[in-house]
Image: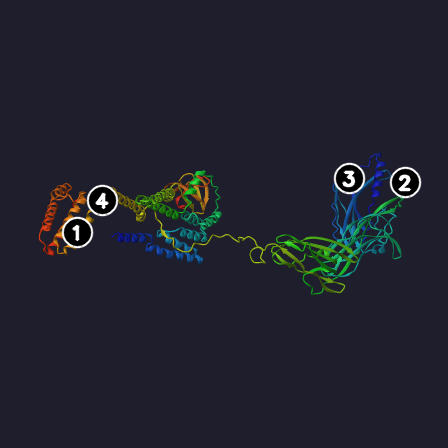
Amino acid sequence: MIRRGAFVLMCIASAALSPRSVVAQGEILERGNQLYQEGDYEGAVDAYEIVLASGHESADLHYNLGNAYFKGGQLGRSILAWERALDRAPGDPDIRANLDLARSLTADAVEPLPRFWLISAWSWWFRLVPRGLLIVFVSTAWLAVTLGVTTRILTRSERSGRVGGWLAVSGLGVLLVFGTSLIVQEFRIGQPDRGVVLARAVSVRSAPADDDDLMLFEVHEGTIVRVDQRAGEWSEVVLEDGKVGWVPADVLGMI
Amino acid sequence: MMRSVTRMRSLVLTGLLAALPAGTSAQDVSARAFITPGNLVEVGRTFILNVEITGTQSLTREPQMPDVGAYAQYLGSGTQSSMQINNGRTTVSLTIQYRFQALAEGTFQIPELNLLAGGQVLLTKPIQVRVVAVGAATQSGAGSAARPSGERQTGEVGPEDLFVTVSPSKTRVHDGEPLVVEYRIWTRVDVTSYTFTSLPESRGFWVEDITPAGGPEVEQLTRNGQQYASAVIRRIAIVPTGSGERTLEPLGLEAQVRVRRNDPRDGIFGRSGLFGTSTVPTTVLSETLTLQVDPLPPGRPEPFSGVVGSLSVATSLDRDSVATNEAVTLTVRVSGSGNIRTVPAPTLAVATDFEVFPPEISESVSASGSGLAGSKTFEFVLIPRAPGLREIPAVQMGYFDQGANAYRTATAAALPLTVTGQAPGGPPGLTRGGVSQLREDIRFIHLGSASLRPASNFLFQGAAFWMFSLLPLAGIAGATALRRHRDLLEGDVAYARGRRANKVAKKRLAEARRLAADADARVFYAEVDRALRGLIGDRLNLAEAGLKTTDLETRLVKKGAASDTVSELKTCLDHCDRQRFAPPGTDSEEKARFLDRAGELMAALDRELK
């Protein structure tokens, strides 16, 4: 009876993890890669976008999409795709290299404001371990805690009881440390909404209104902004150097 | 010809006449232009364009200097003023003098000159000037015809009194073959000094001035039966660059000649003393030199140095052994006769793992006989990048030996060089360096599609997460229950007996079933009785031995057993008691029926005594 139940659960889990559509989308992705290699960058973009539209994604997919946009001359969209890829795989050196190259081609050289060291440390720590690894850590720690507790409950010998206790305590420590990271990452705590300017040049205004008198400055394609609030069709953006203004929401691609 | 003495004289006159009443102010102002010594000029001689303004001594605007083209060369200008008293009338005049040296034969016109003096605009008439070959003017006798009065002089310097000759060391040369040209001054008059007015242009030639330092050495020579003081005034080595007939432009010079003056008007000062002689500037022009330059024959060797003459090449290294990546100096010395200065740097055919720096070049060239000789040194700095026994290849240089009328090649032998040190990594013969970035591009896409997953994959959702979170907790709960059960078994006899009662009873019942096959019914019923009583005793934690049936009933009812079960138990126990003392021979069917009954009863007891 118990065995049958476990088998059914496993079937459900495997079905949830790799449904048939993933295989089909993987084929479209492969097709996109092939088009990219043949130099048909627009075709590659289409294939990648189809996969994204189907509700599937991966860091590599965003990365490849960024490459295809870049080769097709769409700097803003390539930066957007690469930023999304970096969000999903913060340690990937290829993504970082391409982003560095793309940023060097953008028109706006925005000097970032110095950040308070605690905030820098916060974001450094919580972005240090990629999500997949975090999940592995937290799961292992959770298993260790429960295993340690179970051992401690069941064992008669003092030695294995000590081992169980040690296992539970250390597992709990790891669970707390990485569990916090995982929760912060998963709920995007303290991470502002960021966007990339997709239009060639956008006038930034002091208020959400289409009035030329309100124009403050101009930002260009590929510049990354923080989006603080929205009002109808308008978004309030903050540049890395602290400049604030409103732009139409449709010129931004949200990371 | 300009005579500075004239100006001096007029100054003296002016000083003498300064006390005279200036009652001659209202004069007509006029201007005229004339050439001295005459309108017929020999090539190389000086002529003076005089512009004389009468009636005033002040000039508001000077005339513009006329353009005389290529016929003559402007040397300088001066002014002189004079005052004459004739019958109480004072005449003042001002003369501007432009000195020219005639250069080329031909006729040219000096246009009318426009000047402003005394408040009037004055115009002079145009003048025709003819430049003729040397000697032609004296033959025609027109030289003194236009000479104005009062300009006569006795110390006239003739063309045979002062001239410059040019003598090349040869007149037929090969292209690139140096020759020496000597300019010599011949004079029968007293030359105090000279300056060059025109030096030959070096068009088509490569010129090196090799005039000896110091003043010219004067020697007494005889030429055409005349005694001359003669000196080499300029010596050049020239190298024609290109074949064909080449001409070397003439050399012009202006000499200051001291002559005895013989002017009647100067009588009051006498002939001797300070004013007894005067210095006359005289210009002379040398002949034009024509050279025949032959091209070099075909078949020149490569690399060709361009030298016509002789050449030798020597190479040397500053040491025989050098460590890897350290510098060694290779000296290539090219020496010989000919135009050594233009020898190009030799091309070193060293291996590619030698780094060769551009050479440092030093040269020393001097005139030798009819040409040039000297040496040129190239110092190359070489840095070997790989160790081993290396060789600096032979250095070759082609030249043209005009004596043998053939090309030759000068060769310096190859030099061995031991390079010590560690071999750098990588294949030999390749210079190691950083990987140079040719252009920047993005990195390639990541191939493969293994990592695709649904986009809205929120971790804290879904069955898998909850299952994974809760299953271990369930495990802990199970472990706790297990532990509690085990503790009870160990520490609580009643609990342990109760937990084990079923097992013991079933064992006894099984034993009874085995005994049922036997003939002896008493043993069988005793066993069933034991099983029933034991079960109850274990469950109620009572001593089995002292269990009375009535006692059992009350306890069972207290423990919550149903009255049916209790009465059934009583029936069964009674039946057992009865059969134990009954005679043997009971059939086995009845035993089996009773076993079933006992089993059902035990199940009911087990159910009800929780």
- Name the kind of residue labelled 3 in the image: Ser
Question: Is the C-beta separation of discs 1 and 2 under 8 Å?
Answer: no
Locate residue B205, reporting x and y percent: 73, 56
| Secondary element at image label 4 | helix
> Which residue, given by chain and number where applicable, does mark 1 sit on?
B509
Q: CA distance from mark 2 to mark 3?
A: 29 Å
Please tell me which residue lies in front, B278 or A142.
A142
**Residue B204's image quarter?**
bottom right
Single out the mark in the foreground, 3 or 1: 1
- Asked whether the residues under marks 4 and 3 belong to the same chain, the reply is yes
- Name the kind of residue labelled 2 in the image: Ile
N-term-proximal mark, 3 vs 1: 3
> Which residue, given by chain and number where applicable, does mark 4 sit on?
B496
Please tell me which residue lies in front, B596 or B82.
B596
Question: Is the C-beta separation of discs 2 and 4 under 8 Å?
Answer: no
Q: Say which chain tag 2 marks.
A: B
N-term-proximal mark, 2 vs 3: 3
Label 3: how many residues lie within 10 Å, few (<14), some (14-19) or many (20+)?
A: few
Locate residue A98, reporting x and y percent: 46, 50
Number of marks:
4
Please tell me which residue lies in front, B337 or A119.
A119
| Secondary element at image label 2 | helix
- Asked whether the residues under marks 4 and 1 belong to the same chain, the reply is yes
Question: Is the C-beta separation of discs 2 and 3 under 8 Å?
Answer: no
Question: Is the C-beta separation of discs 4 and 1 under 8 Å?
Answer: no
- Residue B268 badge: 2
> Which residue, given by chain and number where applicable, does mark 3 sit on?
B58
N-term-proximal mark, 1 vs 2: 2
- Asked whether the residues under marks 3 and 1 belong to the same chain, the reply is yes
Q: CA distance from mark 2 to mark 4?
A: 172 Å
Locate residue A32, reporting x and y percent: 40, 56
**Residue B291's image quarter?**
bottom right
